[in-house]
Image (tube, rainbow, N blue to C red):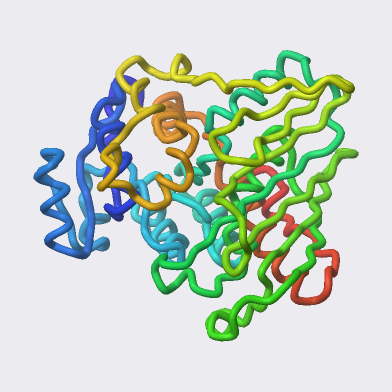
Amino acid sequence: MKNKQINVAIVGLGFGAEFIPIYQRHPDANMYAICQRDHTKLHQVGDAFGIEKRYTDYKELLRDPEIDAVHINTPIQNHADQSIKALRAGKHVACTVPMATTVEECRQIVEAVNETGLTYMMMETVIYSREFLFVKELYENGELGKLQFLRASHQQEMAGWPGYWEGLPPMHYATHCVGPVLAIAKAYAEYVSCFGSGRIDENLISKYGSPFAIESCHIKFKNSDLSAEVTRSLFNTARQYRESFDVYGSKKSFEWTLIEHEPSVIHTGEVPKKVTIPDYAHLLPQEIQGFTTGGVYDADDNQHLSFLQGSGHGGSHPHLVHEFISALIDKRQPFPNARQSANITCVGILAHESAMTGGEKINLPEFTLSNI
């Protein structure tokens, strides 16, 4: 695809609209089409951004031969089916998290990538956030020393979100805390053991049969002496929104701030130091650097809830777009690719299964570990 702009279609225009101007300004992308079932929303967004090609029918969109790639931003229960259909239709896929809701769906996506030779990338925001890029830089420069232990959490009150979230097992949406601990170590999860704790309101339990207020999972890394602990809550737990990860090294350790918008901490032995996390816009093409600190949802009365609660997702959106587009241009695998995305996603799915059986150790399936 060298010397050719990638024609991108965005599917789902709630949170998905955040990415439209980034693709429009990326030098190697062409924001070609949008798709939304609601006609009013479709034309409102299309008119606002000057996008001519508009679809209300996803199947019709996939028949358009001019589309090279789709970026899926629909409800989580649609991710796997829409990803598989796009790959089978000859389109590259970027998909918001999670990859799927079952291990079998993850397997089918990896299988579709194997068979078609097309590209799949799960658009996990935390591993392209400025916080993660800061810690990654410290680690790669040798400042942390040997990694000794990793911890992450994602605690978020989901009251008021669309109905399909109600009673969702906490670990079924765990990629924001699983992703960074695996990504910093460039590792794969080999097996998990998870415990549930507490109990959500009875009216929330019936939809998914999941009673736990909090699920906490230990992850053993493959071919490594490392393990990690991740914690997730969605309902009936009093806590300010927090997506966090802590990295403990032999020379230095990084701990995410306990309170949003306050400094994180670097530990060097007995001396802690508060640090201001820098922005990493310089890693991006100049045309999209401004999107690390601003986007569509800038006005106070026009904030998408996921963007507001996540503090702009750490400036990750243009990094995600650039990784996906540059991988297509350079004909390389993006991070995370299909196998890596399946490993991250299956950790959460199997962690909940473990919690429901009292902490049983469960191995990750081989398709999430072997080479594509």
* Number of marks in picture: 0
Q: Would you place residue 55 above or below residue 353 in this image?
A: above
Q: Which of the pair 27/169 is nearer the observer?
A: 169
Quarter containing the C terminus:
top right
Report x, y in % for residue 264. 65, 29
Q: Which of the pair 257/246 is nearer the observer?
A: 257
Residue drawn at the location 64% of the way across and 47% of the way down = 177
Residue drawn at the location 57% of the way across and 68% of the way down = 235
Report x, y in % for residue 271. 83, 20
Q: Would you place residue 100 above or below residue 24 in this image?
A: below
Q: Would you place residue 337 above or below residue 331 in this image?
A: below
Report x, y in % for residue 355. 76, 70
Report x, y in % for residue 76. 45, 62
Quarter where residue 361 is shown: bottom right
Q: Which of the pair 336/290 is nearer the observer?
A: 290
Q: Would you place residue 5 above or below residue 105 in this image?
A: above
Q: Relative to residue 20, is residue 162 drawn left or right? A: right
Q: Relative to residue 353, is residue 64 drawn left or right? A: left
Residue drawn at the location 80% of the way across and 76% of the way down = 357
Q: Which of the pair 337/35 is nearer the observer?
A: 35
Quarter containing the N terminus:
top left
Residue drawn at the location 42% of the way across and 50% of the way down = 306
